[in-house]
Amino acid sequence: MSSAQKSRGVAVVTGGTAGVGRATVRELAQRGWDVAVLARGHAGLRATEAEVKAAGRRGLGIATDVADLTAVQAAADRVESELGPIALWVNVAFVGALKTFWDTDPETFRRITDVTYFGQVHGTRVALGVMRPRDRGVIVNVSSALAYRGIPLQSAYCGAKHAIKGFTESVITELGHEHSKVRVCLATLPGVNTPQFDWNDNGFEGHPRPVAPVFQPEVAARTICFLAEHPRRNVWIGISSAYTVLGNRIAPALLDRYLARTGFKGQLTAEGPRHGSNVFVPRDEEDDRGAHGMFDDEAHARDPLSATSIAVWEALDGAAERLKTAVRRS
């Protein structure tokens, strides 16, 4: 795509240098968006910005700790100055640990909360600051099936994802109260093959792994990009997300016992590469890791649930648009 072609708009992706964020940046650029990336690691930022430009779009990488509201605001100001009005904001950035709650020190627990939860709060606050006065724009908060069902060894992460869900629902109702055209969406993810599992603060000999079944980050990215153009309140990605959410509604106590028995070993695998925890410092300062983790062999590249949902919603949106056109002409 030539950069001379009209842009779909300016998007901001936090945590856009690895995993789901990186795949989302690539997908947005391929679809014609100019993309600003907010993350900490300079090697990841350089490589991601270069990918956006290689796709024929304008890219801007800004070193930002999303736990710092002042830094997020400064980054947004720079995006608006250099790329133009922000039309889409995607909150992806997070850090995590694989430890029991009592073995997670208070500083690590707070830091995971500050990045994973308050990072999305800060991003939403800053995005609304430019979108509400214009009465347009889309915010996508990336959530997880673990926003509905806590699992062992991830108490800080699960707590943050539960908070993101409640926070997002509250903001949706407040925007609805003032009849705003700004849309806020949730993308509810399953286990995803990302480099974060090499970077978790790990208290075990085994290597952290996503809970099976595992999906490639591009699966999540396609759905996030769909939400950018066809906003919906919440989309579940992966059939495992659906049965996690629904299973916890039906039999939470049974899941308590099941996860107590299987949840530890289900998140550990044979020894893999160790890159050190990224909770307090980035691990892609000198080594760009891209979108994928070490679980390519088992990760699914397609998801029938979200693909079917997207197809149905696109058909419904198309029918609604044709109806509006017919009414206008009559």
Image: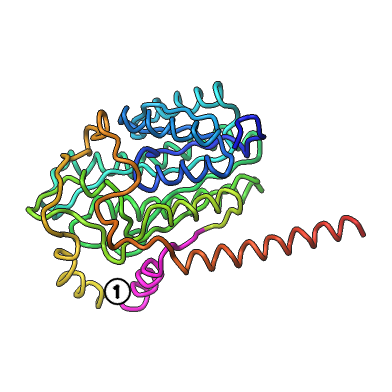
250 is within the stretch colored magenta: yes
184 on left or right of 197: right
Q: Which three-letter amino acid code belongs to the residue tagged 1?
A: Pro
Give 146 or 63, whichever is nearer the viewer. Answer: 63
Instruction: Give the colour scheme of this rendering.
Output: rainbow
155 on left or right of 144: left
Question: Where residue 89 appears, x then y in whole percent?
Answer: 51, 40
> Which residue appears at 14% of the width and 48% of the height?
202
For the stretch drawn in magenta, the main secondary structure is: helix
> Which residue appears at 38% of the width and 52% of the height?
217
Whether 246 is drawn above or below 158: the answer is: below
Q: Secondary structure at mark 1?
A: helix
Residue 211's quadrant in the figure? bottom left
Question: Where residue 166 appears, x then y in whole percent?
Answer: 42, 54
Circle 1 packing at 10 Å, graded few (<14), some (14-19), many (20+), is: some
**Residue pointed to by mark 1:** 252
Question: Where residue 105 appears, x then y in whole percent?
Answer: 13, 43
Residue 201's quadrant in the figure? top left
317 is within the stretch colored magenta: no
Give 2 or 59, whichever is nearer the viewer. Answer: 2
Image mark count: 1
Give 283 or 4, whichever is nearer the viewer. Answer: 4
Whether 212 is drawn above or below 59: the answer is: below
Question: Where residue 57 appears, x then y in whole percent?
Answer: 55, 33
> Which residue appears at 52% of the width and 44% of the height?
139
277 on left or right of 220: left
> Which residue appears at 7% of the width and 53% of the height?
205
8 on left or right of 271: right
Residue 261's quadrant in the figure? bottom left
Magenta-highlighted residues: 234-251
Q: In what quadrant of the picture does the C terminus appear?
A: bottom right
